Each structure stands twice: as C-alpha cells, then as structure tokens.
Amino acid sequence: MTRTILALAILTFSAAAVRAQAPPAQTPQPQQGTSQQPAPPAKPQAVPPSEARARIRTTTNVVLVPVTVKDRQGRLVGDLQRNEFRVFDDGIEQEINPFFSDPWPLSVVVLIDNDLSQKQAQQVQRSLTAIAAGLGPSDEAALVTYDQFPNTVVDFTFDNDRIFTSLKRLELSSHMPGSIAGPMAAGPAINGRQQDTGLPTPVTRSEPMDKDLDDALFGAGEMLKGRSRDRRKIIFLISDGNNSRHNQHSFKQTLQLLLSADVSVYSISVGHAFLQHETTRLEKYAGGTGGDTFYAGKALDLERLYSSVTEQARNQYTLAFTPKGADPKKDYHTIEVRVRRADLEVLAREGYYNSASGEPR
C-alpha cells in the first residue's frame, strides 16, 4: 500500500513539472466537429521604387542613363520594358540592372537669359508663371538669371508658391537691337549744346551683349551637383542661344561637369536665334546630356512647352549598368541606347566620365 501511494505521488509530481515547463498556448484549441485551416504564408512586401532608387547610392561604379523615347508624332512612349532596351558602353553591350520606369521627383534650376531683345523679353515675361504649374509637391526648384554673370534669385525650395511669386515679380532686362550710339541717343541739341529733356536718355547697344552661357550652365551644374542621385536633376534653360567668347569655362569643361553630376539640359530657344544659327550650343548641351531642345516664338508656345519639359523629364526611363569590358584607363566613355521596337526616337546622354560614375550622390 505504501509503495502504491509513493508511486502515485511521484507520477503526479512529474506531470506537474512537465506542465510547468511547457510554453503557454497561443491560440485556443478548435472545438469538436470543426477544422482549423493553417494560416497562409506572409506575402513579401514590395520595395517602393523610391527605396530601390536609393540603393543606387550605395552601389559602386554604376552609370545612370535617363532615356526619353518618342514616337513619330513626338509623343512620349511609356510602355517599354527592360528587355526592349539595349545599352552600349564604347560599343560593348552592357547588362541593364537596375531598370526604372516610374516617375522621378525633380531638382530643377530654371536658368533664364537676362539679355534678350525687348520683344523676346516681353514674351518670356508673360509666360514665366506657367513654369510653376509644372512642378509638383515633391519637386524642388531654384531660379537663376544670367547675362555676363549668373544671379541666383531663389535658391532650392519645395515651396511652389514662392517660385510662382518670384517668377511673377521677375523683371527681365531687355535691349533694342542696334548700335551702341545713334543720332537719337544723346537727345536734342541747340547751337551745338545738348538739351536736358527731363526724360531718360535712350541707350542702344549691339547684340549680343557680353553674356556667358557656358559659365551660367557651369554654375547651374554646380548647384545641382550636390542634389541626391535619387532625383532627376535638370537645367531648364530659356535663352536665345547667344554666347560670348569670354567665358571662364569652356564647352568641354561645362559638359564634363554636367555629365559627372547626372544633369540633363532642356533648352527652350526663343526669338530669332534659330534663324540666326545661334542654337547650335543649346542643341549640343541638350543632346550631350540626354535632354531636349524646343523652339518657341510666342508666349503661348512657351507656356505649352514649359509643361512638356517637366513632363518629359519626370517620366524618363532610367537604365543603370556597371561597366564591363570597356577600357578602364579611359576617363570618357561613349554611350549608345537602342530600342527593339521600330520607328521610335531615343534621347539619352552621349557619354559619361569614369572618374565620376561611382561617386555616391
């Protein structure tokens, strides 16, 4: 009898110890007559495009190639896939990785020629506020005018109202084409003496003025150089294309800076520059950096083009690749982008500098 009681006591103690060591139940047991389905596996969370773009900054030696694709009517083509693109580095085809087709936020320098003819200045003046309409809440913009020297009117800001107000209040300088001095420049004369009429003396000067387009673009590129690489960096240039011979920076130096900083130039040529063959430099900057060139002769044309520029810049494809097979000793490398679909126009930067391709920005 004693042995039986002792055995029962040991069995009861062991069962209590097992229950004490067991983890608490997380879910109630199903009732009789019911079945419990296993929980479905958790779906992997998609990585937002902005986070994917941010990873570029941690990857070394990656070349970014913003690409615009248009059809024969000049309309943007936005349904291309990665396998429809081909990119070549010095003639050697590269693997595209990663690839983005989603819209990018913009970092914009609006660069305005401040030495236009009177008619051109008036047309640009009336159209400027339309620029702000193309900027979204995630876009940042700076406003700069230039003639001989660039002048920052507004530094980078996300405040669209501030940009709108600054554009509305901006007063562009203008000049009348002609010689520096004419018969009416000094006012009337009586007995050989100039008479004071109480009115401002009209002053005319030759066109173009000593204005430095290369230096202005170089300065805008310096402003954009430090902006994040997960933003589309563009210069929104409004100019007649005239350029002096006294720039401190050459075309080659300016283009190198723009390419190194991943900056694209979108130029709007105003006035008669196109007829005077003064748009060559505008086209070279735009073509070399993967931007575009537009032409306008009226204020309404300008307003329409402003929205086209920001839409096109925001909705570019972005091809990225790590250079393989090209000569590593070369600093400058050419880029060619092709699409497999026929009858399409491709706009992309013409090259990159190896010394800057891996810099996190």
Image: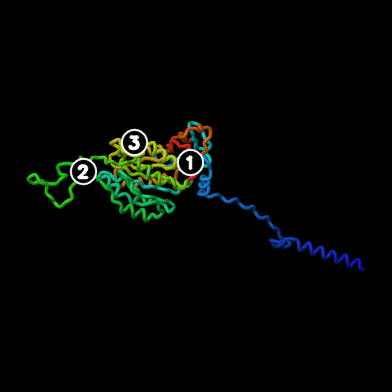
Residue extending furthest toward the left: 191
Left or right of residue 51: residue 21: right
Left or right of residue 241: residue 48: right
Mark 1 = which residue?
Answer: 64
Q: Residue at x 39, y 42 (%)?
A: 265
CA–CA distance in space, label 1 to label 2: 47 Å
Q: Residues within 10 Å of mark 3 (few under 14, many from 20)?
A: few
- The tag earlier along the polypeptide, 1 or 2, is 1
- Labelled pair 1, 2 in contact (Cβ < 8 Å): no
From the viewer's side, name the closer residue of 72 and 9.
Answer: 9
Mark 2 = which residue?
Answer: 204
Q: Residues within 10 Å of mark 2 (few under 14, many from 20)?
A: some
CA–CA distance in space, label 3 to label 2: 27 Å
Locate residue 115, reporting x and y percent: 28, 44
**Amino acid at dot 3:** Thr
Depicted 192 relative to depicted 35: above or below: above
**Amino acid at dot 1:** Leu
Q: Residue at x 44, y 36 (%)?
A: 351
Q: Secondary structure at mark 1?
A: strand
- The tag earlier along the polypeptide, 1 or 3, is 1
